[in-house]
């Protein structure tokens, strides 16, 4: 082997590793993707020409190796411990008191970290080189997942910088960011494949693949939170400083880590992270407090397999077990019949849950939910609680299957399920009190005509008492009628009349949203308003004209067209306008000259209709910034044919992707299409 190619390979590897680190660990790309790709290909060619130079720690080898038959077992040199749990503030105070008493000090400094909901891992580096990665397993023995871990770009194949010990094991959590999880499940749903129930299962399922090419295709990443064995080198003497040092050696550390004083500092951290939990890009199930000083950690030691110097302070669980007492059917504003599981009350995600949506008939069948089943319910953030899955082994002998009723439970009208649609609907229209009630509720809601003070109870009374049949009837109400309702008086009645008066001055997009056309949400209403400019233009548009609107496909176009064909709907609209509901018409938007100001886009792959430079010029003329590399700050990646690493990067970061069709829409209308599934 000549010295030339070997030195060149080392140089290219070092460059690629540095750029990888800037991109995946620091989220701060150093060079455009094209430059990365060019150097990557150079290295590939060199390795092909000189196979003796190939080694499994080359950046070219991250794509996944040949499948294994089974994972081999690894004995951990230093046991991987588990953590004691605290659920209440009192338990955190108890933990801190025990620590202070043992150490005989008045106050203790703690390092606080979010507790990632992923999979614990131990990665061994020898002379700075990644040599082995193993799952936690039972704490003393895990599975060798080195091939799979090598495919995760944020895990360095070599540690960088000064003072790396001869042997160091780093520990942390492998996880799947929420955006990557959603994108992966959306693709699976579109292909009719099985979806993962949560990011944790997705991470575990992706890491425990015998074929590492599958792992390579999954958006996994890692945060390091500690060390195992360390030989031939030293580390700082506090946990916070160790994490900082690991970061300097190129490992990815959670940016939320904070060193605080005492239990009060820990609880303030818990409250802060709890408030931001839903907006963090990854799922967490709590936070971890660790005594920061390593001498104090050693003094405290362990009890069974958990350190006395650390505790996990858990958030309320987002998944719990409960029993389905019944499955009932709710009728929505558009007549959609939604099966809802009535549950044994269960405390989950911080509230008591008694109902969980089952979405539609197919979903009940797919999840095979029976009345009497024990199920896992999930409530994450503000999302409606849902049944994740059934524990089939706990099904009682008298469990009953769900049957979609043939008639509406609210009005007795026949129900229909159109071919190709998942939703079953009541055919009763506004004859159906449930649809009337929901239609009025929707019309008055904050994002529609925003009638302040018209709450659910009042709508119930107005509809139930036959005072209101359509939204237009709201504007015929008088103070005495309203004052005669339960819990209403002259003053509150007058307030409602005033709120109704105020609501008459609205916008076209709010009005289009408020009248309750099936499948027309806020963004479609906005697109219609911008495209047509006036209600008359929307009402007279045919299906073909409607499909020219961004965001409107043939099904939605047909719903809109059918809605305006109904004499009844036209009458209601006419009455609303006669009652004084009004809005300014808007100038029809031409492809907005500067519609893309503030947007960062990345072009990749080959386009058919124009060159990338031409596309770039046109996008820039609309105000967009067109960047050469993908980062979290990228708003969209436009991927033509044979798109390569930029597309993979976008997918791993959860950045939305559009194809050439989407680009054409964007250039014509200034509006972004739905993200593209390119898999
Ligand atoms: N963030 C974090 N998660 N986690 C899990 N730190 C952390 N530390 C752990 C575990 C099991 O254990 C050490 C305290 C030994």
Image (spheres, rainbow, N blue to C red):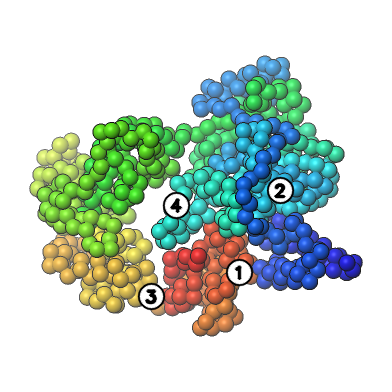
Numbered disc 4: secondary structure: loop
- Ligand 1 quadrant assignment: top right
Q: Earlier in the sequence, mark 1 or mark 4?
A: 4
Please state which of the two labelled residues, at mark 2 or mark 1, is closer to the viewer: 1
**Residue at mark 2 to residue at mark 1: CA–CA distance:** 25 Å
The 10 Å Cα crowd at callout 3, few under 14, some 14 to 19, many 20 or more, is some
The 10 Å Cα crowd at callout 1, few under 14, some 14 to 19, many 20 or more, is some
Residue beneath disc 1: 644
Q: Earlier in the sequence, mark 3 or mark 4?
A: 4
Q: Looking at the rendered structure, which numbered label has been put on residue 131?
A: none
**Residue at mark 3 to residue at mark 2: CA–CA distance:** 49 Å
Residue 470 appears in view = no
Residue 392 on image: x %, y %: 37, 38
**Residue at mark 4 to residue at mark 2: CA–CA distance:** 30 Å
- Residue drawn at (58%, 50%), measured in percent from left and top? 209
The 10 Å Cα crowd at callout 4, few under 14, some 14 to 19, many 20 or more, is some
Numbered disc 2: secondary structure: loop
Please state which of the two labelled residues, at mark 1 or mark 4, is closer to the viewer: 4
Numbered disc 1: secondary structure: loop
Identity of the residue furthest to the right in this view: 3
- Left or right: residue 646 versus residue 580 is right
Residue beneath disc 2: 251
- Residue drawn at (18%, 44%), measured in percent from left and top? 460
Q: Looking at the rendered structure, which numbered label has been put on residue 589?
A: 3
Q: Is residue 638 above or below residue 324?
A: below
Q: Looking at the rendered structure, which numbered label has been put on residue 195?
A: 4
Of residues 135 and 261, the one drawn nearer to the viewer in this rendering: 135
Q: Earlier in the sequence, mark 2 or mark 1?
A: 2
């Amino acid at each position: 082997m000549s010295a030339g190619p070997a030195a060149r390979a080392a140089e290219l590897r070092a460059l690629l590793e540095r750029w990888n680190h800037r991109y995946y660990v620091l989220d701060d790309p150093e060079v455009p993707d094209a430059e990365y790709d060019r150097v990557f290909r150079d290295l590939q060619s060199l390795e092909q020409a000189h196979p003796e130079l190939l080694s499994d720690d080359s950046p070219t080898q991250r794509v996944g190796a040949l499948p294994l038959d089974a994972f081999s077992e690894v004995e951990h040199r230093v046991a991987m411990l588990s953590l004691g749990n605290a659920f209440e503030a009192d338990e955190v105070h108890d933990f801190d008191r025990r620590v202070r008493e043992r150490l005989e000090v008045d106050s203790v400094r703690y390092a606080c970290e979010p507790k990632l909901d992923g999979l614990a891992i131990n990665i061994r580096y020898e002379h700075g080189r990644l040599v082995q990665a193993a799952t936690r397993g039972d704490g003393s023995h895990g599975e060798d997942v080195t091939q799979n871990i090598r495919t995760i770009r944020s895990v360095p194949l070599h540690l960088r910088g000064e003072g790396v010990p001869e042997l160091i094991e780093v520990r942390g959590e492998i996880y799947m960011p929420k955006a990557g999880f959603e994108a992966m499940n959306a693709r699976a749903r579109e292909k009719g494949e099985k979806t993962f129930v949560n990011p944790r299962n997705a991470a575990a399922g992706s890491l425990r693949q015998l074929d590492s090419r599958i792992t390579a295709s999954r958006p996994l990443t890692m945060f390091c939170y500690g060390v195992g064995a360390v030989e031939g080198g030293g580390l700082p003497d506090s946990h916070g400083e160790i994490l900082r040092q690991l970061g300097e050696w190129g490992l990815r550390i959670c940016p939320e880590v904070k060193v605080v004083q005492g239990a009060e500092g820990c609880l303030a951290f818990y409250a802060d992270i709890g408030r931001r939990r839903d907006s963090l890009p990854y799922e967490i199930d709590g936070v971890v407090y660790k005594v920061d000083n390593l001498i104090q950690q050693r003094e405290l030691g362990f009890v069974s397999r958990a350190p006395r110097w650390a505790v996990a302070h858990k958030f309320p669980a987002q998944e719990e077990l409960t029993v389905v007492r019944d499955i009932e059917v709710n009728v929505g504003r558009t007549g959609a019949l939604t099966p809802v599981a009535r549950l044994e009350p269960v405390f989950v995600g911080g509230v008591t849950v008694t109902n969980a949506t089952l979405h539609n008939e197919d979903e009940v069948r797919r999840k095979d939910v029976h009345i009497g089943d024990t199920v896992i319910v999930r409530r994450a953030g503000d999302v409606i609680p849902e049944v994740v899955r059934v524990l089939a082994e706990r099904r009682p002998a008298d469990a009953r299957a769900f049957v979609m009723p043939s008639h509406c439970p609210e009005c007795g009208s026949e129900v229909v399920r159109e071919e190709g649609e998942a939703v079953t609907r009541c055919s009763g229209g506004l004859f159906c009190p449930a649809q009337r009630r929901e239609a009025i509720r929707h019309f008055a809601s904050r994002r529609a005509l925003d009638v302040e003070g018209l709450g659910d109870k009042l709508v119930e009374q107005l509809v139930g008492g036959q005072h209101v049949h359509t939204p237009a009837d709201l504007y015929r109400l008088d103070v005495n009628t309203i004052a005669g309702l339960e819990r209403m008086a002259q003053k509150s009645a007058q307030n409602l009349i005033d709120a109704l008066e105020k609501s008459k001055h609205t916008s076209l997009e709010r009005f289009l949203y408020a009248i309750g056309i099936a499948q027309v949400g806020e963004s479609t209403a906005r697109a219609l308003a911008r495209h047509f400019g006036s209600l008359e233009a929307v009402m007279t548009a045919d299906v073909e004209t409607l499909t020219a609107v961004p965001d409107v496909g043939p099904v939605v176009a047909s719903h809109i067209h059918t809605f305006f064909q109904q004499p009844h709907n036209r009458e209601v609209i006419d009455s609303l306008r006669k009652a004084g509901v009004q809005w300014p018409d808007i100038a029809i938007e031409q492809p907005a000259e500067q519609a893309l100001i503030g947007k960062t886009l990345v072009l990749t792959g080959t386009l058919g209709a124009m060159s990338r430079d031409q596309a770039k010029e046109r996008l820039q003329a609309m105000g967009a910034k067109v960047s050469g590399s993908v980062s979290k700050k990228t708003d969209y990646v436009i991927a033509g044919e044979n798109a390569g690493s930029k597309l993979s990067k976008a997918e791993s970061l959860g950045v939305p992707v559009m194809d050439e069709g989407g680009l054409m829409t964007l250039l014509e209308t200034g509006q972004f299409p739905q993200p593209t599934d390119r898999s």
